[in-house]
Amino acid sequence: MREALAALARGEVVCLPTESSYGLAVDVRSAQALARVTALKGGRPADSPFPLIAGAADIARALARVWPDAAERLAARHWPGPLTLVVPARPELAPEVVGPDGGVGVRVSSHPVASALARGFGAAITATSANRSGQPPAATVAEARAVFGDGVACYLDGGVCAGTPSTVVIVGEDGGLRLVRPGAIALDQGGA
């Protein structure tokens, strides 16, 4: 973990286990790190921003220009867990993490390794799947290493990761909810 935290601080890429697959983490405040992970993945469509993991809800809230009550209720009920909330992004966030609608997607992970890394780093990190764009995500460290090799500074092994991807919900400025991707957390019609 110490090596991974040091790599993030240097603007390098870390491979980490998440609830669903292995992911690639970088410091979202570093343009160099974001460019590095984009290049590793073989590009990134402009309409597909990198999802983020925060170590705690307050770090997630700090990414938002507005944090509606609906986001607070969902976070309180489902975090830590595989629920990504897309909230209105602060204007200073990098374009790589902001979608075309102006939202940033963030979750507080329930995976012990991903959670420990994000908490230890103290700032949001990317949680993009460990794969080249258009390919299936890595389910093991060995699969990720076979694709990225020395392009990744540190690999954290969490065993096999083959879960269901996170549920993704857009939370509008007015608190309106829109399910973007059904996933590991089933939400009722009221969004709870």
Image: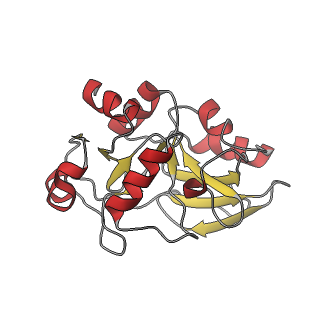
Total label count?
Answer: 0
Q: Is residue 46 visible?
A: yes
Chosen colour scheme:
secondary structure
Q: Is residue 126 visible?
A: no
The residue lying at 39 percent from left, 38 percent from top is 11
Q: Nearer the viewer, residue 180 or 91?
A: 91
Viewed as shown, does residue 161 lie left or right of 19? left
The residue lying at 19 percent from left, 46 percent from top is 159
Viewed as shown, does residue 76 lie left or right of 3? right
Seen as rendered, the residue at the extreme front is: 32
Q: Position of residue 97 (x, y in %)?
A: 57, 54
Note whether 69 is above or below 43 in the view shown: above
Q: Position of residue 153 (x, y in %)?
A: 24, 41
Q: Position of residue 47 (x, y in %)?
A: 58, 70
Viewed as shown, does residue 188 lie left or right of 25? right
The quarter of the image holding the N terminus is top left
The residue lying at 16 percent from left, 53 percent from top is 149
The residue lying at 36 percent from left, 61 percent from top is 39
Note whether 5 is above or below 184 in the view shown: above
Q: Quadrant of residue 49?
A: bottom right
Seen as rendered, the residue at the extreme right is: 174
Q: Position of residue 82 (x, y in %)?
A: 48, 51
